[in-house]
Image: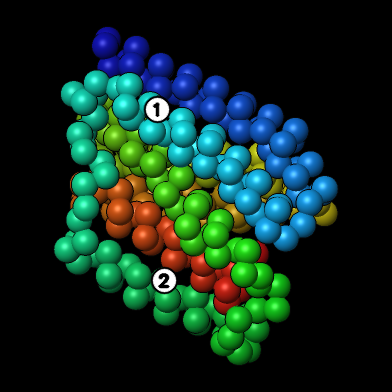
């Protein structure tokens, strides 16, 4: 009964955050993208992302009792986790192969801008991993008896939290594109969650997340 109540509370918290992020995306991020350019646009969107995602994530971790987490110290450093390096090698090979297949060449895409390094390499990974793995999955795994169930649930929720961005993109994305993006993000969310639970540290997931996002904008195009 306690787990059911705590589980409902966690889903309600997620719902509140989803609504908040939808409002922020529509009334803050979209105007920033339409009215600013260059480093001004980058710094403003990064500040919003950091405040909302990292700020709320750290707040929730700090104000949650440690016995409600399966991993009490999510920020502990664990760089000796061998699957981290295997995963990094795999995504580098995958990105190079994808670039070769799609563009018939391997090199930096014309759409890449230096400003992307800040968000895609330094900001997004740590913000999203702190909130979704450091808090949400960390609590969810304590409430769900099966690791696989917890990983799948948080992966789906992670994909759905990207809907505000996909639905406010201009020009509008096709339904097929949105579904494809959601599936990809869910699979990545599962991977990041697995890295967190097995390494008992956020850092492997943060590193893999950041490298993935960087290679996307560097080799494939955002």
Image location (x, y in percent) of residue 121:
49, 61
- Residue at 34%, 75% (x, y): give it: 89
Tell me if 162 is positioned left or right of 191 in this view: right
Q: Is residue 213 above or below residue 201?
A: below
Q: Is residue 152 visible?
A: no
- Up the image or down, 131 lies above or below 44; here it is above
Name the spot of residue 194 as percent of width and height, x first.
Answer: 30, 50
Q: Where does residue 107 sit, x and y in percent of width and height? A: 58, 85
Secondary structure, mark 1, is helix
Classify residue 187 by image quadrant.
Answer: bottom left
Mark 1 sits on what residue? 59
Give the total of numbered labels: 2
Helix, strand, or loop for circle 2? helix
Residue at the (82%, 49%) spot, across then down:
34
Q: Is residue 199 above or below residue 80?
A: above
The residue singled out by tag 2 in the image is 91
Label 1: how many residues lie within 10 Å, few (<14), some (14-19) or many (20+)?
A: few
Q: Is residue 186 above or below residue 71?
A: below
Q: Label 1 to label 2, Cα distance in Å?
A: 32 Å
């Amino acid at each position: 009964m306690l787990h059911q109540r705590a589980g409902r509370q966690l889903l309600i918290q997620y719902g509140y955050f989803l609504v908040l992020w939808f409002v922020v995306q529509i009334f803050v991020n979209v105007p920033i993208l339409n009215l600013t350019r260059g480093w001004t646009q980058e710094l403003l969107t990064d500040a919003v992302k950091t405040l909302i995602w990292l700020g709320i994530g750290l707040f929730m971790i700090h104000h949650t009792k440690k016995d409600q987490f399966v991993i009490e110290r999510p920020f502990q450093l664990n760089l000796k986790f061998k699957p981290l390096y295997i995963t990094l090698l795999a995504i580098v090979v995958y990105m190079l192969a994808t670039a070769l297949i799609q563009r018939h060449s391997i090199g930096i895409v014309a759409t890449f801008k230096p400003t992307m390094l800040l968000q895609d390499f330094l900001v997004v990974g740590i913000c999203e991993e702190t909130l979704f793995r450091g808090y949400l999955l960390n609590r969810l795994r304590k409430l769900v008896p099966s690791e696989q169930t917890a990983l799948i649930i948080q992966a789906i929720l992670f994909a759905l939290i990207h809907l505000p961005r996909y639905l406010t993109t201009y020009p509008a994305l096709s339904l097929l594109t949105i579904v494809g993006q959601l599936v990809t993000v869910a699979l990545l969310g599962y991977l990041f969650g697995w890295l967190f639970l097995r390494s008992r540290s956020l850092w492997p997931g943060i590193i893999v997340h950041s490298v993935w996002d960087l290679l996307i904008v560097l080799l494939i195009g955002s």
